[in-house]
Image (cartoon, rainbow, N blue to C red):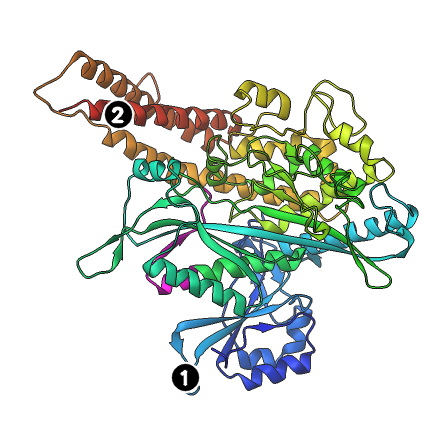
Amino acid sequence: MEELVFVIPANSKKEDIVATLKAHPEIKFVSLVGIDLAGNDTDEKIPMRLFLKDMDDFYSGAAVQTDGSSVVLSGIATLNNAKVDMPIDPSVNWYVDYNFENYDEETGLPIGTLRIPAFLIHNGKRVDSRAVLADTMSFVKKHMLDLFHSHKTISGLEHIDGSKVADISFTSATELEFWVKTPLSHVHVDEMFASQVMQEQYWQRTHGVVRTALEQAVSRLDQYGLGVEMGHKEVGGIKAHLDASGNMTSVCEQIEIDWRFADALQAADNELLARTIIKQTFRLNGLEVSFKAKPMIGVAGNGEHTHIGMAAIMEDGSFYNLFAPKEMTVDFMSAIGYGAIMGLLKNYEVINPFVSATNDSLNRLKPGFEAPVCIVTSLGHSPEIPSRNRSILAGLVRDINNPLATRFELRACNPYSNTYLVLAAIYSAVLDGVKYAIDKTTDELLAELSKESGVEAGYLEKDRAYRSEMDVFEDYSEEERNRLFGAPPATVWENMSSLDNYAEKRAAITASGVFTDAIIDAFKDGALLRWKTELIARIIPENREIVRKAKYIESSFVTDQDSYNWNKINGLRGYLAKDSIDEKSLFTLLIDALNTGDYETASGLQVEMYDKIEELKSLYDAYRKNII
């Protein structure tokens, strides 16, 4: 492994890149990695000889073109105007992806593909997720520098001379959770739920092939320079078993891996790399990996807590966290920190569509599984006692002995959230809040953030509350949560509709001119197409099978309770799945609404379908258990 090259550092000189590649003939291919608006990455195999021969064309975008109608650029790259150019991005790290199942005969080393992050250009404009983030960060940086240069002193940051701020650093990181299982193994949800409630798995010791794969994944990610901080078992899973040959079977465990912060664009690229390396490493050990937000209904889903930070780099090279106050035991945050979290919370309705764009993502965001559903933050009971409230949407993370660690953690993201667009939307909203807070005192901002519902405020909405130090799930009823913090969207349609229903908030994230109407509409149209297709082609057929399997059980000992249960079950089965001449089933009504574009009706029917299916499963479980 010491002979392999894993990283070509950002901003490397062309001659150095050529020298490295010629010295490593095992790197035989190049792949340009463009990210469409759904977060999908492109991958292709271009012979290395062509890259070395036409390197300047690769930099300019003239070397590689793709069919934009084949990726998610809805309404942008159309069938009659589909050509998309792919210039490479030299400002970030390039990674070599090795195939440990295919070795080069001459060198005896695994064959590598140099994966180069790229942009997607259509009609002369950058239209991809990476470009949205890169251009957004340039806009936010410019305006943050302008704010500092026009405000020499900012509340909580009195130790910083704003006129001497030379640059702004945006640091981000994600925590990646995933489920691991042996192929084709099936485990009862009840058993996993019990293990979760009894806390039998969280941070427990890994064993056998899972331990091997986890150790290899951590080591491999370190070889790519990600600086892994920890890999551990998460809350979900059950104990595996040994078969007659001594091999581990029925593996079903949840794992988390964390790595260090990076610049926002590099952090998003790193997450994509991490998913690829983790999946490959576990696969080589005969294990399946799922990054789905909710791979199994009834047990913990996979989150991807997303951390955001901001720092000032001074003319003399010194570095200051902009969220941390001068006196860590006096203030929770600086005025910029307050503005950042207020901007995030106030505008979250138009950030959420990028965070949760799939049926799967919304399945995870249900009360009871430590997944946030309310637009609310927690700061801590006092500046001396940092908060670790796991029930809120976005929390303040701080260490009074280490101001550089001060940051915000958005807990709603999942491993398939488009981190590029999420970070772009977050930092746009942060700037909106900072512009309001820049000339306010920290006391004024703390009072506004902590206000009760019904109290007028300068920036935050009157009829909402935004801070709670209580358990949002246990200490409030559903009605109270919805009234104080806003009702969460139940479907993809409801979530995407927020982009049209909140014009003022949409303006906050489009102020840069990067999130254009075309970009937002393309993202929304792609998400709704996937929502509709998944419902018709996957979710409804899966639910139809649940209905079919809820069959009458023959028994010689039938009580009135059995008869009552079965009558209710059979009535639900018919309501869900059985058409008559005069009346259509819920499944048919939902399909018809989707196919005719009546998405508002379809959204309501989807919610009803989920409720009825859960009722059916509960009733059938009780019915089956009472049969002897």
Q: Nearest the camera: 453 or 605?
A: 453
Residue sitting at x 22%, y 19% = 566
Which quadrant of the structure image shows residue 56? bottom right
Q: Quadrant of the C terminus?
A: top left
Q: Position of residue 170 (x, y in %)?
A: 72, 54
* Image-based side of 461 in relation to 300, left or right: right
Which quadrant of the structure image shows residue 520? top right
On whether residue 519 falls in the magenta region, the answer is no
Residue 128 shows up from this direction = no
Residue 84 shows up from this direction = yes
Q: Nearest the camera: 372 or 520?
A: 372
Residue sitting at x 87%, y 49% = 148
Q: Position of residue 64 (x, y in %)?
A: 59, 69
Which residues fall within the magenta stretch?
A: 279-293
Residue sitting at x 63%, y 22% = 484
Which amino acid lies under the numbered mark 1 shown in the image of this protein?
A: Gly
- Give the vertical position of 316 relative to 142 (above or below): below
Secondary element at image label 1: loop
Which quadrant of the structure image shows residue 547? top left
**Residue topped by disc 1:** 108
Which tag, 1 or 2, sits closer to the chain's start? 1
* Residue found at the very far bottom of the displayed protein: 106
Residue sitting at x 54%, y 77% = 5
Label at residue 620? 2
Secondary element at image label 2: helix
On whether residue 286 falls in the magenta region, the answer is yes
Q: Position of residue 200 (x, y in %)?
A: 37, 43
